[in-house]
Image (cartoon, rainbow, N blue to C red):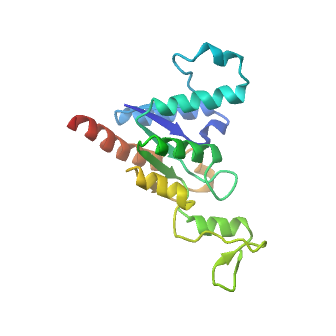
């Protein structure tokens, strides 16, 4: 059972080592992890002449189409929210009607992270939190933007989060392991009932 491993892990200094570690966790739970770094079997020859960015995007979409689910690292990346590319991949899989599971090594809610990012924000006359430009700060008590949480939950997947020390944020796989275990129970349980 193939699962696509979305996340900013591809930007880590040892991205290949990280992909191998993520795949090993998946294998322990009976799943085949597919990294965005993996070569695409049967890649169309017409893609060879494309620029690197376009080719990577097409390969990642093809990997997602071939997967039974997405397991997305939603740990905030370069700001208060998840990596933008990962968020696209979550939405892409949701549009395909397949499960999305999310995990984060940050337990702080999106509102708290956004307020910290914008320097605290302030209460508007309506009582809502606003940034220095007067723009509303989303405050629904969710892990991330409501569309991200909503996509994961509506897909039948689940979100897992725990606060990991900052020094271990990009190496600790304990939350990922919990997420993969849940995905495995759902996916392999459904397959055994067929």
Q: Nearer the viewer, residue 52 or 10?
A: 52
Q: Quadrant of the C terminus?
A: top left
Determine the residue positioned at 45% across, 29% down: 66
Q: Nearer the viewer, residue 104 or 135?
A: 135
Residue extending farthest to the right is 133
Q: Quadrant of the N terminus?
A: top left
33 sits to left or right of 156: right
Determine the residue positioned at 21% across, 38% down: 193
* Residue 95 rendering spot, x and y as whole percentages: 48, 44
Determine the residue positioned at 38% across, 33% down: 31
Q: Nearer the viewer, residue 125 or 40?
A: 125
* Residue 21 rendering spot, x and y as whole percentages: 50, 34
194 sits to left or right of 30: left
Q: Is residue 12 visible?
A: no
178 sits to left or right of 110: left
* Residue 85 rendering spot, x and y as whole percentages: 63, 43
* Residue 154 rendering spot, x and y as whole percentages: 42, 54
Determine the residue positioned at 35% across, 37% down: 29
Q: How many marks?
A: 0
Residue extending farthest to the bottom is 125
155 sits to left or right of 145: left
Q: Is residue 14 visible?
A: yes
Residue extending farthest to the top is 45
13 w.r.t. 127: above or below: above
Image quadrant where residue 112 sits? bottom right
Image quadrant where residue 119 sits? bottom right
21 w.r.t. 152: above or below: above
3 w.r.t. 72: above or below: above
């Amino acid at each position: 059972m193939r699962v696509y491993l979305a996340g900013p892990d591809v930007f880590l200094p040892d991205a290949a080592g990280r992909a191998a570690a993520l795949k090993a966790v998946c294998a322990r739970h009976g799943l085949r992890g597919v990294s965005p770094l993996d070569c695409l079997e049967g890649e169309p020859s017409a893609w060879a002449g494309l620029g690197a960015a376009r080719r990577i995007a097409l390969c990642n979409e093809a990997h997602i189409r071939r997967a039974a689910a997405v397991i997305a690292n939603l740990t905030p990346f370069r700001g208060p929210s998840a990596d933008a590319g990962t968020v696209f991949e979550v939405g892409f899989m949701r549009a395909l009607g397949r499960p999305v599971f999310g995990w984060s090594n940050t337990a702080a809610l999106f509102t708290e992270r956004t307020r910290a990012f914008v320097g605290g924000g302030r209460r508007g006359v309506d009582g809502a939190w606003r940034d220095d430009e007067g723009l509303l700060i989303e405050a629904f008590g969710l892990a991330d933007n409501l569309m991200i949480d909503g996509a994961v939950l509506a897909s039948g997947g689940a979100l897992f989060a725990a606060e990991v020390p900052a020094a271990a944020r990009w190496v600790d796989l304990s939350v990922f392991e919990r997420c993969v275990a849940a995905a495995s129970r759902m996916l392999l349980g459904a397959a055994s009932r067929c």
